[in-house]
Image: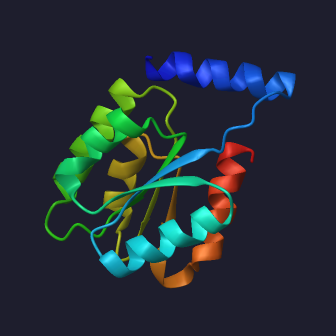
C-alpha cells in the first residue's frame, strides 16, 4: 500500500477513534549502544520500533517497515552528503514522513541543509536524554 494512502487511513482511523495499532518508529543510528538505547526506550513507551545501523539500509527499512516517523542520527562519520541524499529520497518517496535528526557537532550550514532536505526537527545529542527523544516523537506524532 503506498505510504501516503496508509497515512490517510491512519488519520481517518484516529479521527474515528478506532485505531488500535501502535505507532511505528524507524531508528537509524550507527552506534549500536545508542541504537539499542533509543529503540528500547521508544519500545517501552509503546511504539513499534525498527532498528537500522547501516546508512545504506535506511531506504529498504523505510520501504518494508513503513514507519510513522524516523529518528535519524547525523553521526554517520564522513557521510553527511549521503545522509542528505537519503533524506531527499525519503521526502520524495514517503510524502509526509516526519524525520527527527539526532546528533552533535552539526553546524549551522549543515543544519540548513538538513532542514532543506525536509527534517521535522533536530536534537543535539549532547543535551538530549532518551526520554527527550520519546517526548519529541510523541509530540510530532500527536501520540
Residue lying at the far right of the rendered structure = 17
In the rendered view, would you say 28 is above or below 22? below
Residue 9 shown left or right of residue 63 in the figure: right
Tell which of 95 and 1 is nearer to you: 1
Tell which of 92 and 141 is nearer to you: 141
The quarter of the picture where residue 142 lies is top right
Count of residue discs:
0
The quarter of the picture where residue 52 lies is bottom left
Residue lying at the far left of the rendered structure = 78
Residue 65 shown left or right of residue 141 in the figure: left
Tell which of 64 and 79 is nearer to you: 64
Q: In this view of the protein, can residue 55 be seen by the observer? A: yes
Residue 7 shown left or right of residue 115 in the figure: right
Residue at coordinates 85% horizontally, 22% vertically from top-left? 16
Residue at coordinates 70% horizontally, 25% vertically from top-left? 11
Residue at coordinates 38% horizontally, 63% vertically from top-left? 108
Residue 69: % across, % down: 52, 45
Residue at coordinates 38% horizontally, 32% vertically from top-left? 91
Quadrant (top left/top right/bottom left/bottom right) for the N terminus? top left
Type of colouring: rainbow
Q: In this view of the protein, can residue 133 be seen by the observer? A: no
In the rendered view, would you say 14 is above or below 106? above
Residue 130: % across, % down: 57, 75
Residue 88: % across, % down: 30, 36
Residue 129: % across, % down: 58, 80
In the rendered view, would you say 137 is above or below 11? below
In the rendered view, would you say 46 is above or below 85? below
Amino acid at each position: 500500500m503506498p505510504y501516503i494512502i496508509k497515512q490517510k487511513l491512519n488519520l481517518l482511523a484516529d479521527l474515528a477513534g478506532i485505531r488500535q495499532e501502535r505507532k511505528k518508529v524507524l531508528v537509524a543510528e550507527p552506534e549500536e549502544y545508542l541504537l539499542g538505547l533509543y529503540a528500547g526506550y521508544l519500545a517501552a513507551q509503546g511504539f513499534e520500533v525498527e532498528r537500522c545501523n547501516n546508512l545504506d539500509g535506511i531506504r529498504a527499512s523505510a520501504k518494508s517497515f513503513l514507519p510513522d516517523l524516523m529518528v535519524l542520527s547525523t553521526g554517520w562519520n564522513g557521510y553527511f552528503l549521503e545522509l542528505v541524499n537519503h533524506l531527499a529520497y525519503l521526502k520524495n518517496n514517503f510524502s509526509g514522513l516526519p524525520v527527527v535528526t539526532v546528533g552533535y557537532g552539526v553546524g549551522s550550514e549543515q543544519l540548513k541543509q538538513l532542514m532543506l532536505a525536509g527534517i521535522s526537527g533536530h536534537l543535539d545529542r549532547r543535551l538530549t536524554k532518551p526520554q527527550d527523544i520519546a517526548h519529541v516523537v510523541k509530540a510530532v506524532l500527536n501520540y
